[in-house]
Amino acid sequence: MSLPPFHLAFPVDDLEAARAFYGGVMGCAEGRSSAEWVDFDFHGHQIVAHLAPGKAGDRASNHVDGHGVPVPHFGLVLSMEAWEALAARLKAAGVAFVIEPTIRFKGEVGEQATMFLRDPSGNALEFKAFADPAQLFAR
């Protein structure tokens, strides 16, 4: 399946901290930028950190499979191999997880590996993977 890249603009409190996190920790190449925003290549998708102090971070959470999932959040569905590599990279960087890398819905339809973390501005990110990618929208 070939998907078009998505574009997501989100608020951050500090562009240099965003560069260090998305560019350094996450390994996203930087694209265009200005004094107010920075583009990043997020696994082939365009995300843009916009300087908007005080506008990022928690709004709410929902209970999912025993965890308080932050809302809103964004992220990617990766291959299991890429998910495992990212989890190892984030652990090695000392990233604090909101929800540690884990398997959700174990033994059920839609079983998935998932992890949640926050960027320096408090924006929540989720990365997930399925042993069977056909389970992405399974009910």
Image (spheres, rainbow, N blue to C red):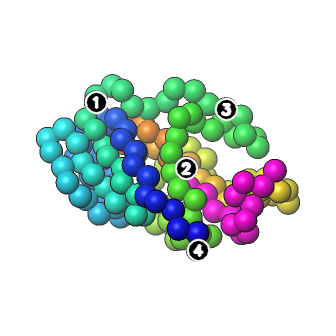
Residue at which label 1 appears: 52
Residue at which label 4 appears: 81
Q: Residues within 10 Å of mark 3 (few under 14, many from 20)?
A: few
What's under tag 1, amino acid-wise? Ala
Between discs 2 and 4, the one toward the N terminus: 4
Q: Depth check: 128 or 32 in front?
A: 32
Q: Is residue 122 left or right of residue 54?
A: right
Q: Quadrant of residue 137?
A: bottom right
Q: Is residue 60 magenta?
A: no
Between discs 2 and 1, the one toward the N terminus: 1
Between discs 1 and 4, the one toward the N terminus: 1
**Do tag 2 and tag 1 residues touch (Cβ < 8 Å)?**
no
Marks 2 and 1, how far apart at CA: 22 Å
What's under tag 3, amino acid-wise? Asn
Between discs 2 and 3, the one toward the N terminus: 3
Residue at which label 2 appears: 126
Between discs 3 and 1, the one toward the N terminus: 1
Residue at which label 3 appears: 62
The span picked out in magenta is 126-139
Marks 3 and 1, how far apart at CA: 25 Å
Q: Is residue 26 visible?
A: no
What's under tag 4, amino acid-wise? Glu
Helix, strand or loop for disc 4 = helix
Q: Is residue 85 above or below residue 60?
A: below
**Percent coordinates x, y for residue 120 in the rendering:** 36, 42
